[in-house]
Amino acid sequence: MRIAFAAIEDPIKQFEVKSLYPIKNVFGYDLSFTNASAYMVLGIILVIALFGYAASRPSLVPTRLQSIGELGYEFVANMIRSVAGEDGLRFFPFVFTLFFFILAANMVGMVPYAFTTTSHIIVTAAMALFVIGLVILYGFYKNGLKFFKLFAPSGAPWPIYFILIPIEVISFLARPLTLSLRLFANMLAGHIMIKLFAGFAVALASAGIVWIPFALVSFIMGIALNALEFLVAFLQAYVFAILTCVYLNDALHPAH
């Protein structure tokens, strides 16, 4: 039994970044093309291919791919309108790209033996910092110093501001942290759990006939978790995108 469990592959190994084409010592930096880079490029290619083909042959009676493209477009546009209003549509290309990049990365990672780029904090943190950087830059560009009204909502008694402003500042500074950790942690934990249950099923099945029922339970749990992880993959892309819309709305309307 101990030997069987020892045969379970390390569930963390699937997140190991490996160099595919070494490019080292470029001004002191390692610019090697890794498996993480390859799967990010793959996700981008899949999104471009899907929407490029969907838009290449438009017709009054849409094909399935055209319908998927139109639904994706309307889904993101309606999400922006509902959160940031019509003014928010100026950020449509950015939010659209962000949502489908994360969704593609999450879904590609569900393929067995594939690499999940969003399970790495450096990837999610880079996207979160870019979002917050865009919010700050556009907020000052559009509103000037009035952008600071974001930290001092109007209508509150003035003594409350001594407590309210520090809380709002801390909350704003925590946004990139929570935005990146949420996506990273959900994808990391989900893939680890799937790997563990799959490993337990194999180990228990090979441990002897008495362990077969437990192996079957572990196998069923693995399938259930796999189905749940597909839902999580979509939801995490949606949550990241809609929170981006919320933060962009603050840049557009800081006084609200």
Image: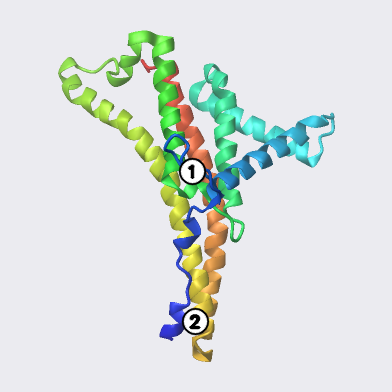
Residues 156 and 26: in front is 26
Q: In this view, does 77 lie above or below 235?
A: above
Residue at left 50%, top 79%? 203
Residue 12 % position (x, y)? 44, 61
List the residue tagged with mark 2.
204
Question: For the residue carrying disc 1, how many other residues have a C-alpha within 10 Å: few (<14), some (14-19), or many (20+)?
Answer: few
Q: SS at mark 1?
A: loop
List the residue tagged with mark 1.
24
Residue 46 % position (x, y)? 68, 42
Type of amino acid under label 1: Lys
Residue 107 % position (x, y)? 60, 49
Quarter residue 61 falls in: top right
Query: Which quadrant does the N terminus fall into?
Result: bottom left
Q: In this view, does 230 lie above or below 127?
A: below
* Nearer-N-terminus badge (1/2): 1
Quarter residue 146 falls in: top left
